[in-house]
């Protein structure tokens, strides 16, 4: 029978309250969802899925204080429940407490290793740790999450975080100075674009942009990519690809954000090839 009909016939049926509460929550009817799910957990406090659903509905309603209680109860009732762990971790991260969030997100990753949302959130919590360096671990998590969710809104969030992480590591490695390897790659990029006709320039930019969409480990010198439109083909590093993309955007799409800050290096490169900075 329909969920609503079952609820009308058995207003104290926990399963009906839970199911209808889930439907309301998914449809954005959050106040009704919370009331239904609160009734469900009042009747059966040990119903873990209802506790998690109540916490999620409260989070969707931007009521983090009300979400914490049912999520903590769910974790105590069923410590291996990945949805309870993940959602509680997300809540704690939203409250700027990454140290408290990490054990829950790590536990969720152990139980549900193929959950890209949790992997993404786990990486964010690692990077939010003060006084700690977890860049390599976070980057690996971002890459795993992107392989599991290669397209869609989550994929775009992952790629954006990867770009920010790459820039963070790039600057950290440079210790406040311009990266001279990036300067050299940008010089080569400018020379390569200058040697191509307009159609060839667009082809090169399109090729490196496509590689960038799949994710680039620019701080890993061992990651290599083949480019058909760069100096007759051949293998180049991920940082070279990023420099070719940055230079191409500056030349062909001025004003567009390349997503990676190589401004200082680009200024040096332009001066060294005789262009105005």
Image: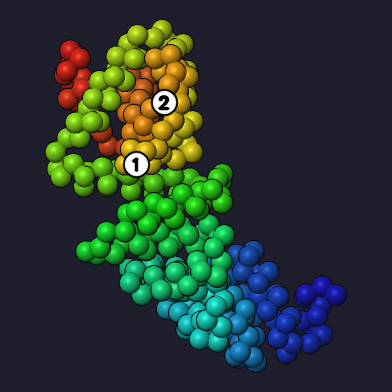
**Height in image: 227 above or below 8?**
above
Q: Which residue is mark 1?
A: 220
Residue 246 visible, this angle? no
Seen at 21% across and 22% down, the residue is: 269
Left of 45 or right of it: where is 137?
left
Mark 1 closeness class: few <14, some 14–19, many ≥20 residues within 10 Å: few
Look at 41% across and 74% down and name the residue there.
103
Q: Position of residue 22 (x, y in %)?
A: 65, 72
Query: Taking 133 as reference, is 34 left or right?
Result: right
Task: Using the image, determine if residue 130 lies above or below residue 15.
Answer: above
The quadrant in which residue 247 appears is: top left
Res 121 → quadrant: bottom left
Camera-side residue of 212 and 239: 239
Give the mark, 1 or 2, whose residue is nearer the N terminus. Answer: 1
Q: Quadrant of the C terminus?
A: top left
Where does the image place residue 264, in percent across and percent down from the top left?
19, 32
Could you tell me if residue 162 is visible in this image? yes
Residue at screen point 64% across, 91% down = 44
> Which percent across, then down, holds residue 119?
48, 60
Tag 2 residue: 235
Q: How many marks?
A: 2
When the figure is inspected, residue 170 is found, relative to residue 246, above or below; the finding is below
* Occupied quadrant, residue 113: bottom right
């Amino acid at each position: 029978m329909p969920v609503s009909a079952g609820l009308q016939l058995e207003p104290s049926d926990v399963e009906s309250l839970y199911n209808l509460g889930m439907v309301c929550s998914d449809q954005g009817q959050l106040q009704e969802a919370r009331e239904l799910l609160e009734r469900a957990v009042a009747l059966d406090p040990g119903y873990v899925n209802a506790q998690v659903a109540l916490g999620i509905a409260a989070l969707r309603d931007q009521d983090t204080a009300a979400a914490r209680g049912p999520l903590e109860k769910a974790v105590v009732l069923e410590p291996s429940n990945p949805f309870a762990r993940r959602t509680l971790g997300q809540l704690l991260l939203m409250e700027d407490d990454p140290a408290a969030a990490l054990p829950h997100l790590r536990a969720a990753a152990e139980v549900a290793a193929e959950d890209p949302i949790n992997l993404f959130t786990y990486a964010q919590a690692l990077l939010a740790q003060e006084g700690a360096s977890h860049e390599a671990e976070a980057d690996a998590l971002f890459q795993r999450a992107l392989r599991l969710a290669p397209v869609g809104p989550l994929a775009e969030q992952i790629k954006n975080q990867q770009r920010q992480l790459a820039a963070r590591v790039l600057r950290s490695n440079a210790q406040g100075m311009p990266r001279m390897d990036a300067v050299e790659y940008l010089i080569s990029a400018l020379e390569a674009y200058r040697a191509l006709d307009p159609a060839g320039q667009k082809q090169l930019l399109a090729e490196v942009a496509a590689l960038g969409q799949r994710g680039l480990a620019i701080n890993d010198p061992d990651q290599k990519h083949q480019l058909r439109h760069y100096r007759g083909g051949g293998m180049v590093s991920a940082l070279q690809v990023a420099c070719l993309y940055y230079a191409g955007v500056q030349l062909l799409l001025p004003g567009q954000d390349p997503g990676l800050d190589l401004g200082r290096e680009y200024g040096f490169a332009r001066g060294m090839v005789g262009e105005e900075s």
